């Protein structure tokens, strides 16, 4: 049963990411990637990482993709001919990506995975367990994340502020 | 909480190798997208896809080894990705304001 779910979700993820690549309109690319992210969230649930699945949907579908869509509508790119012709580059990119995949796959195939200690309980991805780890071992990085967000926010606002001299 | 049996059953059904393969495929598609597309926004989307594949791999290893630290790393990666997207899209908007295009070849001007 879970096998069927796994293969269906991974097929959706791979198909949607490929469709994202070969889509002419950037708007459709964003929407296909959104579907791919939902499939990945389903895989998180299969891995019993409920907290991560929820955060993934909230952050990616709720924040990042909305930001992308907003910027796309803001830019109003209605001229598909504006981009340079890329037939040679397209072939080169496909070959490069394919050979990278072959390289990664070969190294994965040749390597032997270390025997994982089977987890005793199934509560690795629970909010409770994650919260305990996050606020004990990783408290300082967690607080530093807020500084990162603050600096990103200030940076974005300052970058996009119009100069007073230029009007 | 007695769902230990369900997890080990699922682990027998789906070995860790399947998750590694899926992550490899998604990562390669992301690399392909970065090299192939000329639209800066789609390049950014491909970067997001690559980050996601790494997140999936970290989560899989974390779940299969029963160590919650890996999932905390994924949480941090998501936070960094959100900040990165905000700054990157601001740069794209600035670029569009100055050049009227989001073609990646516009950045050739940075040579001079």
Image (spheres, coloured by chain):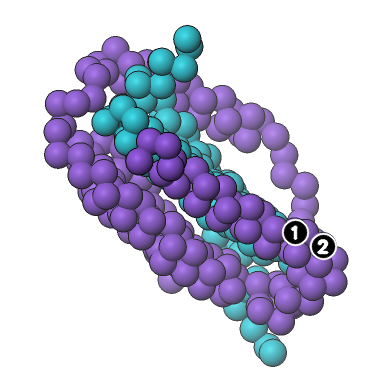
Identify the residue under disc 1. A144
Question: What mark, if any, has residue A140 been given in the picture?
Answer: 2
Q: Quadrant of the C terminus of chain A?
A: top left
Mark 1 residue crowding within 10 angstroms, few (<14) / some (14–19) / many (20+):
few
Secondary structure beneath label 1: helix
Can residue B109 be seen here?
A: yes
- The colour assigned to chain B within the rendered structure: cyan
Which residue is at the front of the view, A130 or A125?
A130
Residue in view at x 19 percent, y 26 percent? A82
Residue for point 68% across, 88% down? B2
Tell me where residue A77 sits by quadrant: top left
Position of residue B107 relative to residue A25, above or below, is above
The chain in purple: A
Q: Secondary structure at mark 2?
A: helix
Whether residue B93 is situated above or below residue A150 in the rendered picture: above
- Give the chain letter at badge 2: A
**Residue A126: x percent and y percent?**
66, 78
Label 1 chain ID: A
Left or right of A167 on screen, residue B76: right
Residues at circles 2 and 1 in contact by the CB criterion of under 8 Å:
yes
Rendered location of residue A68, percent (x, y): 36, 51
Residue at far top of view: B112
- Which residue is at the far front? A165
Q: Residues within 10 Å of mark 2 (few under 14, many from 20)?
A: few
Mark on residue A12? none
Nearest to the observer: residue B71 or residue A29: A29
Image quadrant in which you'd find residue A163: top left
Residue A66 drawn at (x, y percent): 36, 60
Q: Is residue A149 above or below residue A77?
A: below
Residue A25 relative to residue A122: left or right: left
| Spot occupied by residue A143 in the image (x, y as percentages of width and height) | 75, 64
């Amino acid at each position: 049963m879970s096998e069927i779910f796994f293969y269906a979700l991974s097929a959706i993820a791979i198909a949607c990411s490929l469709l994202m690549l070969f889509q002419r309109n950037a708007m459709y690319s964003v929407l296909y990637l959104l579907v791919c992210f939902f499939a990945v969230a389903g895989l998180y649930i299969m891995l019993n990482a409920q907290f991560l699945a929820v955060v993934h949907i909230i952050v990616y579908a709720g924040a990042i993709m909305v930001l992308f869509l907003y910027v796309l509508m803001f830019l109003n790119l209605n001229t598909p001919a504006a981009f340079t012709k890329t037939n040679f580059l397209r072939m080169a990119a496909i070959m490069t990506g394919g050979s990278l995949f072959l390289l990664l796959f070969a190294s994965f195939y040749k390597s032997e995975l270390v025997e994982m200690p089977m987890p005793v309980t199934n509560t690795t991805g629970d909010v409770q367990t994650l919260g305990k780890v996050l606020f004990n071992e990783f408290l300082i990085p967690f607080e530093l994340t807020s500084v990162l967000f603050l600096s990103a926010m200030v940076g974005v606002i300052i970058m996009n502020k119009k100069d007073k001299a230029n009007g | 909480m007695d769902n230990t049996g369900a997890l080990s059953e699922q682990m027998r059904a789906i070995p860790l190798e399947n998750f590694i393969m899926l992550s490899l495929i998604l990562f390669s598609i992301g690399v392909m997208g970065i090299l192939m597309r000329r639209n800066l926004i789609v390049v950014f989307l491909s970067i997001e896809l690559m980050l996601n594949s790494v997140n999936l791999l970290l989560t899989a290893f974390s779940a299969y080894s029963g160590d919650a630290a890996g999932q905390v790393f994924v949480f941090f990666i998501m936070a960094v990705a959100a900040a990165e997207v905000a700054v990157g899209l601001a740069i794209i908007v600035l670029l569009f304001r100055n050049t009227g295009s989001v073609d990646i070849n516009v950045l050739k001007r940075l040579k001079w």
